[in-house]
Image (cartoon, grey):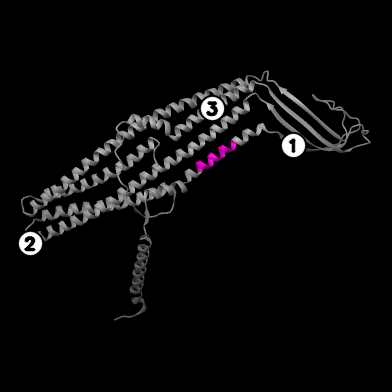
């Protein structure tokens, strides 16, 4: 045999490639089989409320809105400025052009303090402070509304993941049962007790079960990704979820829930606060036409006065105070336009409140009807599952005795799989829809 390196190299290279791919597959399997994280719904909601960036962003916005209260209240306090001035001029010169003139220009250097204090603007500042407080309260309600949105997303993602995991279990059991049935029919066909057509039918429904398995496994991965996002995390993870008990039946009447929602929904409360803030701003803009009384005082010392350009007839220390009353007379209808703009915005805010009230009432009635229907479907799907199980037992018995063909058996198997899926969907649909109903009424926790 030819044992030259040129002939031996391809086989060795192929072996190395095979070993490398086997090692890579083993590493990928070890990486993919990461330990599942045990998770309950309460844990998921706690993580979301602590970590989700939307909640943190809303809290930052609320904190920023709260700073405006201090900014608006600053008008109540005096402003104190330190001043340092130096000047130079030609001897005995006067300002010749302009609206104002100084009695004398001279070389000097001085420092002092100026104090300005608002005495009264006849209610405008108090209206602005009240507006800023209402806007801060509205922003706090926006934080609460964001928390509600995240809670609903976590609940729905959690129940979707539970549904997907349960569907994988159903698919696994279905594949196992149909594999056993296909093997039995194949053995009977080899002994000429069943036809090849029976074998083909068994293979078809086994392939359907395998397809259901693939789709359910993909649904689990998608559900875990959505749950991770709902909790405000970006790391991929697999979870071992704890099943939640079924909630109670919905309230018998939707109208009591509508009344509750109109009182407790945080985004509705926030819009009402926005409307009240708009009314306060209307009052503030109306007060622009009122006088503004203020106090100004100055005091300081001039350590240097040029004795050549100006004899020292000016004392080095100086102090003075004045009270000024500014009365608006005419400014091109500016204040009137600002007041009318504020009134229009207040009207728009009021209409937004009414529009949201109508939307909330509709959402509650819709969520209640969906939850009521889903609750009733629990008994229907449970009965469907019982009857499909009994029908499969009967069909299998008749098929084993040769009293029916493979079509009746496969149809019974398909009906059982459909009944199991519908029963799972009914359970997790109701849990998700009940959470949506709680959200619509402002009672989701």
> How far is the residue under mark 1 from the one under mark 2?
108 Å
Q: What's the magenta bit mostly, secondary-structure-wise? A: helix
Does 235 sit left or right of 300 as displayed? left
Disc number placed over residue 278 in the picture, else none: 3
Residue on which disc 1 sits: 81
> How far is the residue under mark 3 from the one under mark 2?
87 Å
Task: Report x, y in % for residue 261.
Answer: 39, 32
Looking at the image, residue 250 lies above or below residue 342: below
Q: Nearer the viewer, residue 41 or 162?
A: 41
Looking at the image, is mark 1 or mark 2 nearer the viewer?
A: 1
Mark 3 or 2, nearer chain start: 2
- Can residue 298 be seen? yes
Quarter-wise, where is residue 432 in the image? top left
Residue on which disc 2 sits: 191
Please tell me whether mark 2 sits on a helix, a strand or a loop. loop
67 within the magenta span: yes
Does 321 sit left or right of 149 as displayed? right
Task: Report x, y in % for residue 444.
Answer: 39, 40
> Label 2 crowding class (10 Å Cα cut-off): few <14, some 14-19, many 20+?
few
Does 177 sit left or right of 34 as displayed? left
Does 375 sit left or right of 205 as displayed? right
Please tell me whether mark 1 sits on a helix, a strand or a loop. strand
Which image quadrant: the N terminus? Answer: bottom left
| Range drawn in magenta | 57-68
Say which residue appears at 19% left-offset and 54% top-offset.
206
> How far is the residue under mark 1 from the one under mark 3?
34 Å
């Amino acid at each position: 045999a030819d044992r030259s390196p040129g002939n031996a190299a391809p086989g060795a290279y192929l072996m190395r490639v095979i070993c490398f791919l086997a090692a890579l597959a083993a590493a990928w399997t070890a990486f993919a089989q990461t330990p599942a994280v045990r998770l309950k719904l309460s844990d998921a909601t706690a993580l979301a409320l602590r970590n989700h960036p939307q909640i943190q962003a809303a809290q930052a916005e609320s904190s920023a809105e709260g700073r405006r209260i201090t900014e608006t209240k600053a008008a109540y306090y005096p402003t104190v400025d330190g001043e340092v001035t130096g000047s130079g001029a030609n001897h005995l010169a006067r300002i010749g052009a302009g609206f104002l003139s100084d009695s004398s220009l001279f070389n000097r250097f001085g420092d002092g303090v100026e104090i300005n204090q608002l005495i009264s603007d006849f209610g405008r500042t108090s209206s602005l402070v009240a507006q800023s407080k209402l806007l801060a309260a509205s922003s706090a309600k926006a934080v609460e509304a964001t928390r509600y949105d995240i809670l609903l997303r976590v609940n729905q993602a959690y129940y979707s993941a539970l549904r997907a995991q349960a569907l994988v279990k159903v698919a696994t059991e279905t594949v196992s049962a149909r594999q056993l049935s296909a093997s039995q029919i194949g053995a009977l066909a080899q002994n000429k007790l069943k036809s090849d057509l029976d074998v083909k039918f068994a293979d078809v429904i086994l392939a359907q079960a395998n397809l259901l398995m693939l789709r359910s496994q993909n649904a689990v991965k998608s559900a875990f990704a959505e749950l991770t996002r709902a909790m405000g995390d970006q790391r991929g993870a697999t979870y071992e979820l704890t099943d939640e008990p079924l909630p109670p039946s919905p309230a018998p009447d939707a109208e009591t829930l509508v009344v509750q929602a109109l009182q407790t929904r945080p985004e509705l409360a926030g819009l009402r606060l926005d409307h009240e803030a708009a009314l306060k701003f209307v009052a503030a803009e109306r007060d622009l036409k009122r006088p503004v009384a203020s106090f100004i005082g100055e005091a300081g010392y001039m350590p240097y006065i040029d004795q050549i350009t100006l004899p020292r007839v000016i004392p080095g220390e100086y102090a003075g105070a004045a009270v000024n009353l500014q009365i608006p007379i005419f400014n091109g209808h500016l204040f009137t336009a600002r007041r009318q703009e504020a009134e229009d915005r207040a009207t728009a805010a009021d209409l937004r409140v009414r529009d949201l009230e109508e939307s909330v009432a509709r959402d509650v009635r819709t969520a209640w009807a969906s939850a009521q229907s889903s609750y009733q479907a629990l008994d229907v799907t449970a009965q469907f599952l019982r009857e499909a199980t009994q029908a499969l037992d009967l069909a299998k018995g008749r098929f084993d005795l040769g009293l029916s063909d493979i079509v009746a058996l496969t149809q019974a198997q398909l009906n059982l799989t459909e009944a199991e899926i519908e029963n799972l969907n009914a359970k997790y649909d109701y849990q998700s829809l009940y959470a949506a109903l709680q959200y619509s009424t402002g009672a989701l926790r």
